[in-house]
């Protein structure tokens, strides 16, 4: 007879319940019930390593974000990974775009913040150098969704708007999200796909130009992570994330796209101060192509 501890057993322990009560107070039991409902409704998640499920749930609790797929604030997503040298089902924590909006508003530093789909009948043009999006948002979106825009205005009136095409979002998700190809991932659901796309653009925008509270920094670290040990964030290669390296890789990818789509030598010159040696070589090649 197996004595292996199940996720339900783990959440039923008094010490675990007290831990959630210390975080959420009277909301703890309702939160635990919602997590167990999600687990019971997902066969892979129900067989996932219980400790990774617990740590994902604890992260959501510490951020005060509900684990409810219908609300879209955060998810616990199952996928296979290596733990202690063995392939197991593990639980990955993911934050939705609404979760990042919620965390931003709590800082009191954001006057406005939003992310939207951009439809083909709304889109006019986008200048990748000045990041100026010309789009008719007074018109109800119809036809295909061609991209996603994120915007925020801080309390000091500083504004930022970023637009990514749908192709850019998909390329980014395939590269950075292990859960992208999972049938149990929000990415695999037609409606939730657009929510995840908005999250991708908004998260990137906030991390580069927004004001980051300690809570938001924790969210950035925890997003798309597996925690076999709480606070030890593991990703696809099972190594602790290097945020600086990841952000630099993302920025290089964006610069590469700007270089390839530049229409004038002046646009390329504006990119030089942000480029590494490899990208500088490509800029010189593009200058020759444009002459």
Image (cartoon, helix red, strand yellow):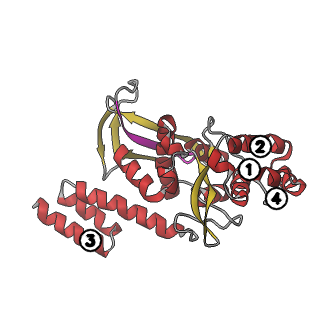
Q: Is residue 206 left or right of residue 142?
A: right
> CA gap, disc 2 to disc 1?
8 Å
Mark identifier at residue 118? none
Mark identifier at residue 61? 1
Q: Which numbered disc, 1 or 4, marks the residue closer to the eye?
A: 4
Ranked by sequence position, the earlier of labels 3 and 4 is: 4
Q: Position of residue 7 (x, y in %)?
A: 76, 53
Ranked by sequence position, the earlier of labels 1 and 4 is: 4
For label 4, the residue is 1
For label 2, the residue is 31
Q: Name the residue at 68% across, 65% down.
A: 228
Q: Name the residue at 59% across, 44% down.
A: 101
Q: Position of residue 192 (x, y in %)?
A: 52, 38
Q: Position of residue 115 (x, y in %)?
A: 49, 40
Front residue of 1/42: it is: 1
**Mark 2, residues whose alpha carbon is within 10 Å: few (<14), some, or many (≥20)?**
many
**Mark 1, residues whose alpha carbon is within 10 Å: few (<14), some, or many (≥20)?**
many
- Majority secondary structure of magenta residues: strand
Q: Is residue 143 left or right of residue 53?
A: left
- Tell me which segment is drawn in magenta: 144-158
Callout 3: SS: helix
> CA gap, disc 1 to disc 4?
34 Å
Q: Position of residue 269 (x, y in %)?
A: 24, 64
For label 3, the residue is 280
- Quarter of the image where the C terminus is located: bottom left
> CA gap, disc 3 to disc 4?
64 Å
């Amino acid at each position: 007879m197996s004595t292996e501890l199940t996720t339900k057993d783990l959440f039923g322990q008094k010490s675990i319940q007290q831990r959630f009560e210390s975080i959420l107070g009277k909301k703890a039991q309702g939160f635990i019930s919602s997590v167990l409902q999600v687990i019971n409704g997902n066969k892979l998640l129900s067989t996932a390593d219980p400790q990774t499920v617990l740590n994902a749930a604890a992260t959501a609790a510490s951020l005060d974000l509900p684990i409810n797929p219908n609300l879209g604030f955060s998810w616990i997503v199952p996928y296979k990974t290596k733990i202690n040298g063995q392939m197991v089902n593990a639980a990955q924590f993911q934050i939705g775009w609404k979760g990042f909006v919620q965390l931003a508003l709590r800082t009191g530093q954001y006057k406005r913040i939003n992310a939207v789909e951009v439809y083909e009948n709304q889109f006019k043009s986008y200048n990748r150098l000045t990041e100026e999006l010309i789009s008719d948002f007074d018109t109800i979106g119809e036809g295909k969704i061609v991209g996603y825009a994120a915007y925020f205005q801080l309390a000091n009136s500083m504004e930022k708007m970023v637009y990514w095409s749908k192709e850019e979002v998909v390329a980014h998700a395939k590269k950075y999200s292990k859960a992208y190809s999972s049938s149990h991932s929000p990415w695999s659901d037609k409606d939730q796909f657009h929510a995840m796309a908005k999250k991708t653009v908004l998260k990137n925008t906030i991390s580069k130009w927004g004001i980051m509270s300690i809570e938001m920094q924790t969210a950035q670290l925890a997003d798309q992570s597996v925690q076999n040990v709480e606070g030890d964030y593991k990703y696809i290669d099972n190594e602790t994330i290097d945020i600086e390296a990841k952000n630099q890789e993302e920025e290089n990818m964006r610069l590469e796209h700007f270089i390839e789509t530049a229409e004038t030598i002046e646009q390329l010159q504006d990119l030089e101060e942000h480029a590494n040696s490899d990208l500088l070589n490509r800029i010189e090649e593009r200058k020759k192509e444009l002459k």
